Image (cartoon, rainbow, N blue to C red):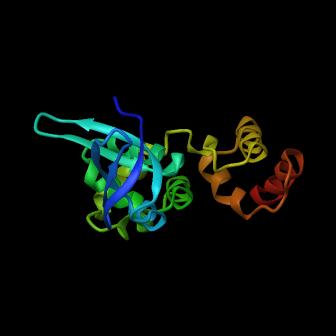
Amino acid sequence: MIKAIEGVVTKKDPAFVVLKTISGVSYGIFISLFCSAKLNKGEKTELNTTQIIREDANLLYGFLDASEQKMFEMLIKLNGIGASTAMAICSSLSPNAFSNAIISGNADTFKSVPGIGPKTARRIIAELSDAKLISDESVEDYQNEALLALEALGFKREKIVKILPDCKSANTSELVKEALKKLA
């Protein structure tokens, strides 16, 4: 399994890049539009990769951002979501926007992605809402602790994740108090 490739960008298209390694081997790697915007031809870079081996192809998908790679890998595990659809989502939504859409159940965010209809958007939300996305690196520890504390008090996760982004507190106890006022 190829986990990362370091090399010089010799060819760059909006969603594809060719990296030539120091040993002279060139790798074709599919990338998101966010990743593409950060790369320049002739520049040395390292991409974390996800390798997908199929009967008819051996494909590499590259990421500069680990959270974008995690998002891609979660999506390709879903039934009916292939690598190209997952990469379209990665090109349209930042990891933060993706997490927020899952947590809040906002299907319109996914419907804005080319190739995603209402049925697929609802399926993505339904399948990933069970995942503990709130424990992602993009969420501070105190927010995760507050979420767990409020769940322990008997509040529904859906209600909690809808009000937590509106809270301004920067530590666990204050955030729990603020959230309790809004939940009441």
Quarter occupied by the N terminus: top left
The image position of residue 18, as x and y in percent, is: 30, 54
Q: Is residue 17 above or below residue 79?
A: below
Quarter occupied by the C terminus: bottom right
Give the camera-side residue of 92 and 26. 26
Residue at 43% from the left image edge and 51% from the top image edge: 125
- Residue extending furthest toward the left: 56
The image position of residue 57, as x and y in percent, is: 15, 40
Give the camera-side residue of 5 and 176. 5
Residue at 86% from the left image edge and 49% from the top image edge: 171
Query: Is 45 left, or right, of 180 in this rendering?
Result: left
Q: Quadrant of residue 156?
A: top right
Q: Is residue 150 visible?
A: yes
Residue at 40% from the left image edge and 53% from the top image edge: 8
Residue at 55% from the left image edge and 53% from the top image edge: 103
The image position of residue 179, as x and y in percent, is: 79, 55
The image position of residue 108, as x and y in percent, is: 42, 68
- Residue extending furthest toward the front: 23
- Residue extending furthest toward the top: 1
Q: Is residue 121 visible?
A: no
Give the camera-side residue of 12 and 159. 12
Query: Is 169 left, or right, of 92 in this rendering?
Result: right
